[in-house]
Amino acid sequence: MELQEDFGLAYLFIAHDLAVVKHVSDRVAIMYLGKIVEMADADSIYENPRHAYTKALISAIPVADPTAKVERELLEGDVPSPIDPPEGCAFGHRMSHPRWPESVGMDLSLKEVAPGHWVQPCPCCTDLS
Amino acid sequence: MKPLLTVENLKMHFPVKGGVFLRPVGACKAVDGVSLTVAEGETVGLVGESGCGKSTLAKAAARLLKPTDGRIVFDGHDITHLGMGALKPLRRELQMIFQDPAESLNPRHSVRDIIEEPLVIQKVGTRAERRKRVAELLERVGLSESAGSRFSFEFSGGQRQRIGIARALALNPKLILCDEPFRARC
Amino acid sequence: MSDSPRQLLEVTDLRAAFDTESGELTAVDDVDFKVDRGRTLGIVGESGCGKSVSALSLIRLLPQPMGKVKKGEVWFDGRDLLRVDDDEMHAVRGGEIGMIFQEPMTALNPVHTIGRQLTEAVLLHQKVTPKEALEQAVDMLKRVRIPAPEIRVGEYPHQLSGGMRQRVMIAMALINRPKLLIADEPTTALDVTVQAQILALIEDLQEEMGMAVILITHDLGVIAENCDDVVVMYGGRVVEWAPAVDLFSDPLHAYTKGLLRSIPRLDRERKTKLPTIRGNVPALDEMPSGCRFSTRADVEHDEKSKNERPPFEEVKPGHWVEKCPFCYQG
C-alpha cells in the first residue's frame, strides 16, 4: 500500500517482517524484551547491524530463491518472558553468552557508534568497533 | 527535521499477581526505559518478537495506556499525564491502526459508517461533506465506492486492513501508528 | 488409478463448496496435484484462494454442515480418502496423516495436560501400553526440542509460550510417524527467529522419518527455502504447478509473476514503490467463470477468455500452467 505518498504524514510502523519494514522506513528501531537494542537509518541497520539480536533477525528472513544456499545460525531457546526479566543484557542472557555477566550492572543506554547509528553497548552482543 | 513524537525513557510496568490473595508477586516490564523520536513526515519501523513490548510501546505513545514512568511529547505538547478529555483533540492528529482489523471494525456497521465515525465524533463537516470525504478515502485506499455499503466481514483480511487505513486517514492526522499493518496482506 | 511406489498422494478434480445464504459458493474448483513420498509440496496464494480449503477437503475436515466436497478423488497410499468409511478416516487422520494448523490453541485441548493429549493420540493409533505411550510422548517432546519434557508433560497448553505450543502441535502431528504432514501456515503467528527454528525442525524430522509434507503458506520466501514443488492457487483453482526451482526462475502465469515481483526484499532499493498486483481478489460469487485472474491482470482479456475456463496443461516436463491466452506468458 502506497501510504508514503501521503505527503507530510509521519508513521510509526510496528512489525515483525524486517523486509517490509526496510522497504517503508527511514529509520528502524530493534526492540528486545522491553528495550531498544539498536536504532539507525534503515540502510545502515541492514547493511551494518551491530547487535547480535539484529543480526539474528536479519539472518532469519527466508530467502525467496530456491537455488540460494542459506546458512543460518538458529537461535536457541524461546522468546523470554518480560516478567522479572534477567539483569544486564537480556539477549546475551538468552544466548548464555560467556561475557553476559559483564553486562550486569553496566549502563546499557544506547551509544552512538556512527552518525545516527545507536546500539546497546553490552560486551556480549555488540560489536563496538 | 522537527520532532513530532518524542518518547523519553518510557516505562510500562504491570504488576503480576499471584498466590491465594492475588498479591503482587512480580512486575511485567513490558517496556523498560525506551527513548524514540519520530520526525514530521518520517517513517520509523519498530521491529521485534511478539512479547518484546513494541505494541505496548505504541499504545502508550498514543496514550491509550498510562505510562508508569517517562515522558511523551507530541507536536510540542507534553501528553504524558493528560486525561481522556484533554486527549480528545490529540486523537485527530494521532491515529492508530491495529493488528487485527477484524477486531477493531464493528461488524454491525457498514464500511461507510465505520470510516465516517471519527468524523462524526469530532463533529467534522455536514453529512453530505462527510459522505464525500468517505468516498475519497475509499478511492485512496483502492476500494470501490460500492464497498461502502457492504459490511467489513464481507471483505478479505487485506481489504479490511485498507478499511482500517481509510478510517485512520479520515481526520488528516499528522502521525499514524500501525501495529503489524502488513500481516494480513496476503 | 495408477499408484507408482514413489507417489503418496494424488488429488484429481477436487471440488469443494460452501452453502451460504447467497447460495452455494465453490471454494475449490477442480484442483489437481500430487505429492511423492518424502517430498515437500508448497501451496501458495492469497487468503481466500482455496489453499486451506483444499487441505481440509482431502482429510475431510471441512467445517460442517456448510462445507461439502462435491467431487474428485484423493488417492492416498492406495485408497481414495473421499470414499473410505469414517472409521478408516479416523485412523488415517492423526495416524498416517498428521496436521498442524496456524493457531495451536484451537487444536490443543485447554483442560488436559500436554502429556495426556499426546498419550491419547498414541493409544488411539497404536497397540501399546499407557506407559509406553507416555514414553513416546516424552521422546517426541524431546525431538521437537522442548526443554525438560518430563516436566512439560504435566503442564497445560496455556502455560506454554506461542513457540512452545507450536512445538507441542508438531509433536502431536508427528507422534504416530505419519507418511504425510499437512502444515497450514504453521509459522504465520510466530516471529522470524522462531519461524526459522520451527521450519528447520520440520525439515530435520522429515528427513529422519521420511515423511512427505504439504506446506501451505502465503510467504514465498518460506516456499523457496522449504519446498520441492509448488502449487500456486488463485480463486479456487491451480494456475501453476511446477518444481520450485522452475517456478522461481521461469514463472509462466501472470499471477505467479505478480506474486514474485511483490516480494519485499532486503536488497531492493528502499522507499521505492513495491510492485503489487492491482485490485483485489473478487469475492467468490463475483469470480469470472473463465480466467479468474482476468479482473486483475495488466493485459485486457477478451470475452471468450473471461467466460471460458482455460485448459490446464503441462507445458514443460513437470511444469503445469493454466493456459489463458492473456495470462500464459511462456
Image: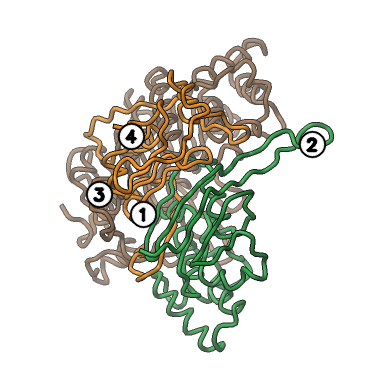
Chain colours: A orange, B green, C brown
Q: Residue sitting at 35 percent across and 63 percent down? A: B1
Which label was assigned to residue C37? none
Tell me the SS state at disc 1: strand
Vertical order, C86 against B84 (above or below): above
Q: Please identify, in this view, whether the residue under mark 2 or under mark 1 is nearer the observer.
A: 2
Which residue is labeled 1 in the image? C234
Percent of width and height locating residue C39: 34, 28
Tell me the SS state at disc 4: helix
For mark 4, does the 10 Å Cα neighbourhood hold few (<14), some (14 to 19), or many (20 or more) residues?
some
Between marks 1 and 4, how big is the CA–CA gap? 31 Å
Which residue is labeled 2 in the image? B23
Of the residues shown, which amino acid type is indicated by label 1? Tyr
Tell me the SS state at disc 3: strand
Can residue C237 be spotted in the picture?
yes
Of the residues shown, which amino acid type is indicated by label 2? Arg
Tell me the SS state at disc 2: strand
Which residue is labeled 4 in the image? A59
Q: Quadrant of residue C206?
A: top left
Between marks 3 and 2, how big is the CA–CA gap? 64 Å
On whether disc 1 and disc 4 are found on a single subunit, the reply is no
For mark 1, does the 10 Å Cα neighbourhood hold few (<14), some (14 to 19), or many (20 or more) residues?
many
Of the residues shown, which amino acid type is indicated by label 4? Ser
Q: Is residue C222 rendered to the left or right of residue A35? A: left
Discs 3, 2 touching: Cβ within 8 Å: no
Discs 2, 1 touching: Cβ within 8 Å: no
Which is nearer the eye, A2 or C286?
Answer: A2
Of the residues shown, which amino acid type is indicated by label 3? Val
Percent of width and height locating residue C216: 41, 41
Which is nearer the eye, C167 or B54?
Answer: B54
